[in-house]
Image (spheres, rainbow, N blue to C red):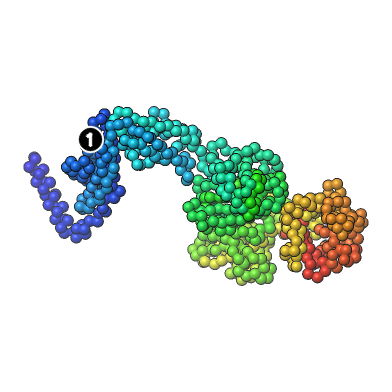
Amino acid sequence: MKLIQKISFLLVGLLILNGCEEDDGLTDVNMASPQNVDAEFSIKRDNSGEVTIIPIAEGADSFVLDFGDGSEVSEEIENGERLTHVYPEGIYDVTITAKNFAGDEAVATKNLVVSFDPPENLEVNVEISSSDPLSVSVSATADNAIGFDMTFGEIEDEEPIFVLAGEVGTYTYSSVGTFLITVEALSGGEATTVYTEEVTITDPFLLPITFESETVNYNFNNFGGGEGDGVAIVDNLNPNEINDSDKVGSYTKVSGSETWAGTSALLNENIDFSSTTSIAVDVWSPQAGIPVLFKIEQEGNPDVFVEATQNTTVANQWETLTFTLPEANQNDFSILALFFNFDTSGTGETYYFDNIRLTNPVLLGLPLDFEEDPTSYSFTEFGGAPTEVVANPDASGINNSASVAKTSKANGSETWAGSFIDIDIPIDLSISSTLKLKVWSPTENNQVILKLENPDTGAEAEVTQTLATANEWVEVEFDFSEADVNEEWTRIVYFFNFGIQGSGLDYYFDDLAYVTSADNDLIGTWKLAEEGGALGVGPSVGDVSWFACDAACVAERACYYDDTYVFSANGDFSNNFGTNNETWVEEWQTGSPDSCGEPVAPHDGSNPATYVFDAQNNTITLNGEGAFIGLAKAVNEGELPNVAVPNEVTYTVSFESPTEMDVYIESGSGVFWQYKLVKQ
């Protein structure tokens, strides 16, 4: 039986050899040379000098060791085997030669210290990873040490890891907390030296930065002066509706510090600018008008950065500054910096900041006109119809706006392909059950579907219209009278050329708005919008470059921004004044500097007045001496007191929505006073 088995094995071997000879494809074998040659050492701690050596390498099949002590080199050992060798005390260079089956070799030399004396002068360095605050690296040095046993204090009865001298031990914690790291230096003798150090592991340092977490290390570093002070976390000294949090960051620009002094932080991961390029910061400043520069920077490459500046508008109270960084999504950024009172040397003043977060500076709602930063509009496509905000390709006819949305119905896309956008302010069908949309289509007679959804309840409503015109802007109305007015419709879905497979054509749309009656919309109580730019003057409509009342101006003129303009259903008009019957009165009225005060006749609402709304020409005419919208001095003939007080004044208006109205008046020639009013 044994003879038969041997003959069988012989026949199989001959068949294999013959097959190899006949198959030219197997004659050449590509085999990588060994790489990353290294060795692990361990020494008996009994003064014997016995060292165990485990050679390692990628792509190696065997090893030969030169022990470095003048003895003969080892026999060839297979990968995974180990050798023991006895050394006298000393320092040796162990040479490891790694080989593969093809005969390729790679060589490395590693230092070995053999000492029977106790390790001395033990020094340990513990570092928390800048990119992962749960991970630590530990390195150690000691005279006479061959290596170190390390434990990290998280696991009970933890088995130590052995780290050779000159190498680094790493460990990743599974939770936050304070842990005891123990490093024991080992030599060839029984005596050891031990070092311990507590390390506090915290949660990742990411946006938003709130200063409220006890498990985050809010590590800010000052520069340009006062570096040692850092950013203190303190109690909120003046909570208000802008920032009512308990803890805030405190930065003092020390006296004599550089004009560019500030504070910065390295986050544990890159800031995600995929959906917005704006960052908001709550700021408390001792003065209004202080420039605050916000900067983001790429780690390791300070030449790659984006920055923006905003001025504070109030003193000794919280406000939110929003920094828009249009190029932020073009690179990776993990460093942020704040420069308070930039370009001015420090005087010892203290600033407070809090709630650094990504923000969408635009609250999306109707009308949806795509005129803000394109990153404010995040569309989700389905079926092969990507949608984005682009420049208007045909600014003509009924749509001369700068930006519109474009849906590209790709070649072969689904017949039902489309896209949707979620908005912040729900569509209120009680304002109007009919919506209008401007559309530009490359083809005639295709179906356009507008669909409303409430993602929370699953409610849906859709209306289909057919476009009869191609290659020009047309306005299409969608009647949602059958939809539930009580639903919060926050998702808008668009379908173009519905029912037809995509062929690579582009469809454009813009200005989704309510269809309403301007006569009915006007009736009610209106006031100036309490925002920068709601009051201004310039050489043309839309241009307020001569003067615009900014946020600081709005705060200063609070007595004016609560004035109201009332349009009654019977055609009566009245000027009403707010707190303490005060408004903003100007020097031409009182002879004193501009300030808050009682209104001055005839602009005090004492005379009866009426109004006429001309829907065709979009004008409002006020009849009655002293009746006005916006500023009393701006009348059609010019500015008071340079002209007589008229008995009627005509304004041009446009409704951005049923609750928002833009008003302007040309005072004389080429002087356009402009107001943004909101309905109460």
The structure residue drawn at horizontal position 26% and vertical position 53%, both measured from the top left corner, is 33
Left/right placement of residue 478 relative to residue 645 reads left
Looking at the picture, does residue 160 appear above or below residue 78? above
**Residue 132 at x, y = what percent?**
47, 43
Looking at the picture, does residue 252 appear above or below residue 519? above
The structure residue drawn at horizontal position 8% and vertical position 40%, both measured from the top left corner, is 1
The structure residue drawn at horizontal position 41% and vertical position 29%, both measured from the top left corner, is 156
Label 1: few (<14), some or many (≥20) within 10 Å? few
Amino acid tagged 1: Pro
Question: Quadrant of the rendered structure where residue 317 is?
Answer: top right
The structure residue drawn at horizontal position 62% and vertical position 46%, both measured from the top left corner, is 254
Q: Which residue is mark 1?
A: 88
* Residue that extends furthest to the left in the rendered view of this protein: 3
* Residue that extends furthest to the front in the rendered view of this protein: 256
**Residue 73 at x, y = what percent?**
18, 43
The residue nearer to you, when weighing 596 against 377, is 596
Question: Element type at marker 1?
Answer: loop
**Residue 618 at x, y = what percent?**
79, 65
The residue nearer to you, when weighing 161 against 459, is 161
